[in-house]
Amino acid sequence: MALKPIFTIIGATASGKTKISVELAKYLNGEIIGLDSRQIYRGMSIGTAQPEKKEMDGIPHHLFGFREAAKPISAGEYANLVRERVAEIQSNGKVPIICGGAGLYYRALTKGIFEGSVSDLPTRGRLEQAYEQNPVALLERLKSIDPHYAEIVHINNKKRLIRALEIHEATRKPPSEQFRLQEEQPGKTLELFTILLSWDRNILIERIGQRTDAMLEKGWIEEVKTLLVKQKEIGMPFPALNSIGYRQIQSWLKNEISFEEMREEIVVRTRQFARRQVQWFRKENVNLIIEMNHLDPGIISDIIGDIYRTIYGN
């Protein structure tokens, strides 16, 4: 096999990206690089669905569980880490396979990052406090700054709303203008062969529910308790604890909601997140879209065959 592209497997949460990437890595002598904004954190393996040793099946994995939960990361920094791992894997004669569902990180790899995209932690902290007090006021502020971008930011999407205002304060330009000015940067982008896993919506919803139950059974609640203790000991907020599931479990621990309400809200929020992921990735230029309605050894073998034939023609 003369040509060795950089493969990327993207798709919504619970779409089987890990399983397919591992099988592809076996077939191509590859190694896997994570592309997930929450799977990077240490001590959050259950709630972020980090691949377990058994799932890795002997395939080297990079950028999973390597960062303290108190330390956030920007898309630009993450893109640099991915590029470093890609170069390292290629230098060893192996095939890089990037796997994840972080749309912004994917765009950072394929289109680069605009100047000023680095995180401003003091500003973010102030905006997060303002959001807790009055999220409507923040959305109204964004509407006055950037009406076009505000149309696609839901008031419940705390991270995206705060990030938009953070960008404006750092650059003094509307977020939509920054994205329009975003150009490919030589040496800062990667040529990727991208595979998008596209699931039947009803089946994906069912998979999300099943995975949520499995996470809770594995000890997700205990994981959150441990993180809360560490957060208190360190005396610094863990931004990742605002993630889907972690917020709801904290509400349950405070007796604000019942267990059933907690479980249902996690599922609903995850479904909403999956829908946004699908909408995002449908706008990206991908090489191969694979329509999914089940995930078993037969379909995985067919997928790998489709990828091989698409690239090599036989």
Image: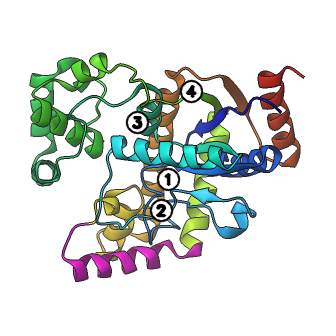
* Disc 1: which residue: 267
Sooner in the amino-acid sequence: mark 3 or mark 2: 3
Q: Position of residue 83 (x, y in %)?
A: 49, 42
Task: Determine the CA span between mark 2 and mark 4.
Answer: 40 Å
Q: Answer few, some or many: residues within 10 Å of disc 1's Cα (few below 14, many 20 plus, some between 14 and 19).
A: many
Relative depth, front residue between 231 and 144: 231
Residue drawn at x 24%, y 23% as measured from the top left: 178
- Residue 13 at least partly seen: no
Classify the position of the C terminus by image quarter.
top right
Sooner in the amino-acid sequence: mark 4 or mark 3: 3
Residue drawn at x 40%, y 36% as measured from the top left: 104
Quadrant housing residue 182: top left
Residue type at mark 3 is Leu
Q: Secondary structure at mark 4?
A: loop
Nearest-to-viewer mark from 3 and 2: 3
Residue type at mark 4 is Glu
* Disc 3: which residue: 104
Q: Is residue 233 magenta?
A: yes
Task: Determine the CA span between mark 1 and mark 4.
Answer: 35 Å
Task: Determine the CA span between mark 2 and mark 1.
Answer: 6 Å
Residue type at mark 1 is Val
Q: Secondary structure at mark 3?
A: helix
Does 219 sit left or right of 196 as displayed? left
How many numbered discs sit on the rendered protein?
A: 4
* Disc 4: which residue: 191
Marks 1 and 2: in contact by CB < 8 Å?
Answer: yes
Nearest-to-viewer mark from 4 and 3: 4
